[in-house]
Image (cartoon, coloured by chain):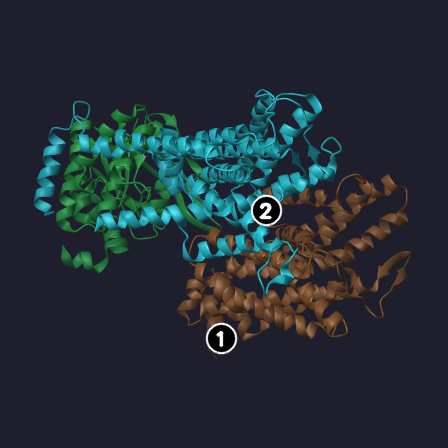
Chain colours: A cyan, B brown, C green
C-alpha cells in the first residue's frame, strides 16, 4: 500500500465519516458474527447429540468410563474459564469441586433436600468463596507465583477444615444413602442407569455453551481483553476487576457443578477425593492436553486422559511378561498423567485442539 | 578477576550510594522491629497457651519441640526459597524430591548398611545430580515461556515422582533407625537427639548457603542472575548454567534435609506432601528467596503449630499454620522478613 | 476554566521523584504538545492523568470535576481516552475486534451496531486491509494506528496521545496528522500529545509544554517555547541549534 493512496483514503474517509448510516460489508458480519457463531453452536449441538446417543452403542462398563470422562471434562471446562479465558492460573480448583460435592452430600444426608437445590446452593457457595479469595488476591495485588500459591493453599485449608469437622464426618467422608426406586427430583436411579450419563451430557453441554460465549458474547470478550492486556482494557473503559471476578465466579460455579455430579454418581466423598491437589491437577491436565483457552480443548483432553486410569489399572491387574513385579501395585496411572502433562508443556504447549487450529490458521495464511 | 568486575558492575547498577545507605538503615530498622513484633506475638500466644493448659511445663515442651521442628521445616524450605530467589519458580516438586531423598537415605542405611549420617555423602550428591538434570532437561526449556508452564512442569514432576515411588516401594511406611539415638532433658523438656542434630544441621546449612552466596565467585554469579538476568548475561554469565547450578544446590539442600530428618520420620510415598505445604508457608513467611528468612520462618511455623495445638486441641495444628499463612500472604506478600522491593 | 486542569502533580517511585509539581491547562478544542527528553516524566504524567497511577500530591480536573486518582475505566466513561507509547493490542484478537471491544464498552450494547461502528473507525484510521489480521502479529506502525483507532472508538472529549507518530516513516505520519486535525476541527476533540518529532509539534500544537526532570521547564506558544534558549539547551541541544 503506497502512502499516497493511504493518505487519500484517509482523507476521503475523514470527510464522509458517518458510521450510523454506513452499511457493514456482509463479508465482515459473516466472519465476525452470524455465520461463525451459528457454526460453533451447530457443532455444539452435534457434539451433544452424538454424546447423548452413546449409551445405545456401548456396554455399561464403557458407559461408566464415559461418565467419568464427562465429569473430568466439566472440571476442565470450569478451570479453563478462569485460567484459560481469564488468564488467572488456578492451582486450587479442588476447592470449588469439593464445595460442590460436600454441599450436595450435606444437603441430601443431613436435610434430605433435593440434589438439584443442593446444586444451586453449592454453586452459590463456591462462587462466594471464589469471589472472596480472588477479591483479596487482586486487592492485595498477588500475581504470578503468589497467586498460584494462594489458590493452592485455599484448597488445602478447606481439606483441613473438612478433616476436622464432625458434621462432615471428618476423614471418614460422607456416603449418600441408597434409596429404592427411581426419582429425577432426588437424582436417584438404578445402578448403571444411563440417566446419570445423560445428566452429565447436559451439564457439559451447558458448560460448553458458556465457553463459547467467551469467544463471542460481550462479557466474555471483555474478560479476554483484560487477559490480553489489563491496562489497555482499562483505558478502553473496561473495569478489569469486575471482569476478572466474573470469570472467577463462572469458573467456580461450573467446577462446583462437577463436584455435585461426582457426588451423585459415585455416592461418596471424603476430604481427599474432594479437596486434594490431585483434583486440581486433573482439571489442569485435562485443559492442558486439549488446549488451554480453547472451547473444545477440555472436552478433548478429558476424552484422551480420563480413560487412561481404567486402561492402566487393567494393565496392572494383568501385567505382561517381564513386568510381573508391577502386579497389584498402584500409582502407574498417575505417573502416566504426570508424564503426559510434562510432555505437553514441553513439546505441545497449545494442546491437541490448540495445535490443530494453530496449524490450520498458519496453512490458511499461506 | 572477572567476578570482581561483575561485583563492580552490580554495584554500578544500584542507586546512588547515599540513597542506598539510607535504604539499608531503614531495612535494618524494619528487620529489628519485625523480629521484635514476632517475638512479642509468639510470647503472647505462649502465655495464652499457658493460661489454657494451666501448665507451664506443657508450654515449655511445646516451645522446645516447636523450635526443633522449626529447624527441620526451614531445612526443607531452603532449596525451595533458593529456587524461587534465583529462578522465580515455585517448586511444587520440593516435597516429592524430599520423599525421594528419604527413600535414598533408607536404601543407603537399610540395604547398604551405611551409618545414617554417613548417608549424607551419598544422598547429597545424588539429589544434586537429580536437581541439575531436572533443571537442564525439564525446566530450562520452559524458562523463557509463561511462568505457569514452569509451575506445571514442577507439578508434573511432583505427581510423577511421588507415584513412581509408590509404584516401586509400595505404600507401607519404612524407617531409618539411629544407632545412638535417644533424648535428654532440658529444664524438664524432652529433647530428641535426632531432631537436635537436624536443628544444628539447619543452622549450619543457612550459614553455609549464605557463605557460598556471599563469598564465592559462583555465589556472586548466582546473585547476579537473581537480581538481573539480562545484565548478568551481558557481563558474560551463562544464565542457563547458573539455573542448573541453583537447582543442583537446591537439590543438595533437599538431600541434606531428607537424610537429617530420616531417623525420626516415618517414610511413605506421601511424606513429602505434608512437608511441601509447610515449606511453602515457611518460604512465604521468610520472604521468597531469603535464605536466612527461611530459618526464622521455620521457627515461626514450628512454634505456631505447637502452641496452636495447645490452644485449639480439636483442630489440626496445620490449620492454624495455614491461617497464619493466608494472613501473611495477603498482608505482606513479600514475607514478614522479606525485603521491601 | 479549562477543560483539563493539572495542578501540582507529584509522583515518586521508591525515592526517585518522577514528577515534581506539574501544572498545566488544556483549553477545550485545543491541542497541547508535550515535549522533553526521555525520562523527563511525560509518560508518567499521562499515567497520573489517566488513572493508571495515583499521584502522591496534586489534582487533575476534567470539565470542573476532580478526577484525581479515578481509575482508567471510569475516565473512559467520562470521555477521556489515551494511547500507549508501547503498543498494547488485545493480541489474541483481530484489528476489528480490538476496536469493537472499545465501542462495546463505551455503551453500544448491540453487537451488530458495535461492529458497524468499529468498521467505520477502522476505515477512518486506514486500517481496512488489516481488519481481520490478528493484532499481535501486526507491524509496529500499524499497531500504533490501532492504538489510535481504539481510543477513537470511545468518542473521547479529551484524547491523550503518547508518541503516536514515533516509528512511522514521514509519509505515514501525514495521514495520522490530518486525522488529528480533522478530529479537532470537525469534532472539537481536545488533545494532549507527547511527541519527539518537532515538525509534528509545530504543525499540530496550539500550545506546548516542555518537561525536564519531572517538572515543567517552559510552557506557552509553540514558537515561544521552541525558541526559548533554556529549552534549546536542555532538550534540543546542539543538533537542533545547527539545524535551525
Q: Chain of mark 2?
A: A
Residues at marks 2 and 1, CA–CA distance in whole angstroms: 45 Å
Circle 1 residues within 10 Å: few <14, some 14–19, many ≥20:
some
Instruction: Give SS at disc 2.
Output: helix
- Residue that numbered label 1 is attached to: B3
Q: Nearer the viewer, residue A224 or A209?
A: A209
The image position of residue A261, as x and y in percent, is 56, 32
Q: Nearer the viewer, residue A61 or C77?
A: A61
**Residue B194 shows in this picture:** yes
Instruction: Give SS at disc 1.
Output: helix
Say the numbered circle drawn on residue A270.
none
Image-quadrant location for residue B144: bottom left
Q: Nearer the viewer, mark 2 or mark 1?
A: 2
Residue at 35% x, 25% y: name it. Answer: C64
Q: Nearer the viewer, residue B41 or B212?
A: B212
Q: Are marks 2 and 1 in contact (CB under 8 Å)?
A: no
Residue at 76% x, 74% y: name it. Answer: B113
Residue at 61% x, 41% y: name it. Answer: A155
Q: Chain of mark 1?
A: B
Horizontal arrangement in the rendering, residue B119 relative to residue B50 (left or right): left
Compared to residue A150, the image places residue B77 above or below, namely below
Compared to residue B21, the image places residue A121 above or below, namely above
- Residue that numbered label 2 is attached to: A278
Horizontal arrangement in the rendering, residue A117 relative to residue B61 (left or right): left
Q: How many marks?
A: 2
The image position of residue C33, as x and y in percent, is 24, 41
The image position of residue C26, as x and y in percent, is 28, 33
Amino acid at each position: 500500500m503506497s502512502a499516497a493512496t493511504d493518505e487519500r483514503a484517509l482523507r476521503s474517509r475523514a470527510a464522509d465519516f458517518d458510521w450510523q448510516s454506513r452499511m457493514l460489508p456482509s463479508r465482515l458480519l459473516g466472519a465476525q458474527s452470524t455465520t461463525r457463531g451459528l457454526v460453533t453452536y451447530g457443532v455444539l449441538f452435534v457434539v451433544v447429540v452424538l454424546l447423548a446417543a452413546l449409551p445405545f452403542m456401548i456396554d455399561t462398563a464403557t458407559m461408566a468410563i464415559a461418565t467419568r470422562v464427562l465429569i473430568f471434562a466439566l472440571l476442565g471446562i470450569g478451570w479453563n474459564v478462569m485460567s484459560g479465558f481469564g488468564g488467572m492460573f488456578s492451582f486450587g480448583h479442588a476447592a470449588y469441586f469439593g464445595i460442590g460435592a460436600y454441599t450436595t452430600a450435606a444437603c441430601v444426608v443431613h436435610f434430605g433436600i433435593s440434589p438439584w437445590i443442593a446444586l444451586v446452593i453449592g454453586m452459590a457457595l463456591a462462587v462466594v468463596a471464589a469471589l472472596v479469595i480472588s477479591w483479596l488476591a487482586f486487592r492485595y495485588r498477588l500475581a504470578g507465583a503468589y497467586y498460584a500459591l494462594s489458590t493452592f493453599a485455599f484448597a488445602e485449608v478447606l481439606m483441613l477444615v473438612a478433616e476436622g469437622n464432625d458434621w462432615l464426618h471428618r476423614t471418614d467422608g460422607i456416603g449418600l444413602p441408597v434409596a429404592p426406586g427411581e426419582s429425577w427430583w432426588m437424582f436417584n436411579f438404578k445402578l448403571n442407569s444411563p440417566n446419570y450419563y445423560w445428566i452429565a451430557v447436559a451439564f457439559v453441554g451447558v458448560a460448553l455453551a458458556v465457553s463459547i460465549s467467551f469467544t463471542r458474547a460481550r462479557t466474555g470478550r471483555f474478560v479476554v481483553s483484560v487477559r490480553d492486556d489489563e491496562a489497555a482494557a482499562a483505558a478502553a473503559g473496561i473495569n478489569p476487576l469486575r471482569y476478572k471476578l466474573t470469570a472467577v465466579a463462572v469458573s467456580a460455579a461450573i467446577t462446583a457443578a462437577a463436584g455435585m455430579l461426582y457426588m451423585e454418581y459415585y455416592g461418596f466423598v471424603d476430604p481427599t477425593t474432594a479437596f486434594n491437589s490431585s483434583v486440581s491437577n486433573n482439571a489442569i491436565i485435562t485443559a492442558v492436553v486439549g488446549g488451554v483457552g480453547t472451547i473444545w480443548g477440555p472436552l478433548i483432553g478429558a476424552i484422551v486422559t480420563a480413560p487412561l486410569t481404567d486402561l492402566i489399572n487393567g494393565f496392572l491387574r494383568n501385567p505382561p511378561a517381564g513386568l510381573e513385579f508391577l502386579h497389584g501395585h498402584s500409582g502407574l496411572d498417575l505417573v502416566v498423567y504426570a508424564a503426559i502433562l510434562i510432555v505437553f508443556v514441553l513439546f505441545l504447549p497449545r494442546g491437541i485442539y490448540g495445535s490443530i487450529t494453530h496449524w490450520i490458521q498458519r496453512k490458511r495464511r499461506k | 578477576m572477572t567476578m570482581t568486575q561483575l561485583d563492580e558492575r552490580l554495584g554500578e547498577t544500584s542507586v546512588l550510594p547515599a540513597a542506598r545507605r539510607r535504604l539499608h538503615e531503614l531495612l535494618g530498622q524494619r528487620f529489628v522491629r519485625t523480629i521484635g513484633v514476632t517475638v512479642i506475638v509468639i510470647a503472647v500466644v505462649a502465655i495464652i497457651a499457658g493460661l489454657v493448659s494451666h501448665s507451664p511445663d506443657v508450654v515449655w515442651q511445646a516451645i522446645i519441640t516447636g523450635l526443633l521442628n522449626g529447624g527441620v521445616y526451614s531445612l526443607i524450605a531452603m532449596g525451595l526459597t533458593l529456587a524461587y530467589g534465583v529462578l522465580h519458580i515455585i517448586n511444587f516438586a520440593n516435597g516429592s524430591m524430599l520423599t525421594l531423598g528419604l527413600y535414598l537415605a533408607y536404601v543407603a542405611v537399610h540395604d547398604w548398611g551405611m551409618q545414617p549420617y554417613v548417608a549424607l555423602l551419598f544422598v547429597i550428591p545424588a539429589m544434586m545430580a537429580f536437581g541439575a538434570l531436572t533443571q537442564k532437561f525439564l525446566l530450562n526449556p520452559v524458562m523463557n515461556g509463561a511462568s505457569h508452564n514452569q509451575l506445571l512442569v514442577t507439578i508434573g514432576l511432583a505427581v510423577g515422582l511421588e507415584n513412581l515411588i509408590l509404584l516401586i516401594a509400595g505404600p507401607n511406611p519404612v524407617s531409618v533407625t539411629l544407632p545412638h539415638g535417644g533424648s535428654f532433658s532440658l529444664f524438664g523438656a524432652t529433647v530428641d537427639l535426632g531432631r537436635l542434630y537436624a536443628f544444628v544441621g539447619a543452622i549450619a546449612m543457612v550459614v553455609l548457603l549464605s557463605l557460598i552466596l556471599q563469598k564465592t565467585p559462583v555465589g556472586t554469579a548466582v546473585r547476579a542472575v537473581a537480581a538481573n538476568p539480562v545484565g548478568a548475561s551481558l557481563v558474560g554469565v551463562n544464565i542457563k548454567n547458573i539455573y542448573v547450578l541453583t537447582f543442583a544446590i537446591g537439590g543438595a539442600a533437599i538431600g541434606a534435609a531428607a537424610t537429617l530428618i530420616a531417623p525420626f520420620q516415618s517414610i511413605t510415598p506421601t511424606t513429602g506432601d505434608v512437608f511441601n505445604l509447610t515449606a511453602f508457608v515457611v518460604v512465604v513467611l521468610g520472604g521468597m528467596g531469603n535464605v536466612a528468612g527461611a530459618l526464622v520462618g521455620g521457627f515461626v511455623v514450628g512454634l505456631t503449630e505447637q502452641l496452636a495445638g495447645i490452644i485449639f486441641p480439636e483442630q489440626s495444628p496445620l490449620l492454624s499454620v495455614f491461617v497464619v499463612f493466608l494472613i501473611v500472604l495477603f498482608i505482606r506478600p513479600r514475607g514478614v522478613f522479606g525485603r521491601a522491593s | 476554566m479549562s477543560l483539563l486542569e493539572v495542578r501540582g502533580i507529584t509522583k515518586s517511585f521508591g525515592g526517585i521523584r518522577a514528577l515534581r509539581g506539574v501544572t498545566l491547562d488544556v483549553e477545550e478544542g485545543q491541542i497541547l504538545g508535550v515535549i522533553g527528553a526521555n525520562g523527563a516524566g511525560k509518560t508518567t504524567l499521562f499515567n497520573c492523568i489517566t488513572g493508571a497511577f495515583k499521584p502522591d500530591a496534586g489534582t487533575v480536573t476534567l470539565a470542573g470535576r476532580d478526577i484525581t486518582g479515578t481509575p482508567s475505566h471510569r475516565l473512559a466513561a467520562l470521555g477521556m481516552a489515551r494511547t500507549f507509547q508501547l503498543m498494547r493490542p488485545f493480541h489474541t484478537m483481530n484489528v476489528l475486534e480490538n476496536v469493537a471491544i472499545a465501542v462495546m464498552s463505551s455503551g453500544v450494547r448491540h453487537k451488530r451496531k458495535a461492529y458497524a461502528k468499529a468498521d467505520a473507525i477502522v476505515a477512518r484510521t486506514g486500517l481496512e486491509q488489516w481488519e481481520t489480521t490478528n493484532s499481535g502479529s501486526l507491524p509496529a506502525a500499524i499497531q500504533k494506528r490501532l492504538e489510535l483507532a481504539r481510543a477513537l472508538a470511545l468518542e473521547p472529549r479529551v484524547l491523550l496521545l503518547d508518541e503516536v507518530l514515533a516509528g512511522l516513516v514521514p509519509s505515514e505520519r501525514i495521514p495520522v496528522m490530518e486525522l488529528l486535525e480533522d478530529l479537532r476541527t470537525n469534532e472539537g476533540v481536545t488533545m494532549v500529545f507527547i511527541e519527539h518529532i518537532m515538525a509534528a509539534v509545530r504543525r499540530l500544537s496550539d500550545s506546548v509544554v516542555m518537561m525536564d526532570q519531572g517538572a515543567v521547564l517552559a510552557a506557552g506558544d509553540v514558537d515561544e517555547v521552541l525558541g526559548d534558549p533554556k529549552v534549546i539547551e536542555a532538550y534540543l541541544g546542539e543538533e537542533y541549534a545547527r539545524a535551525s
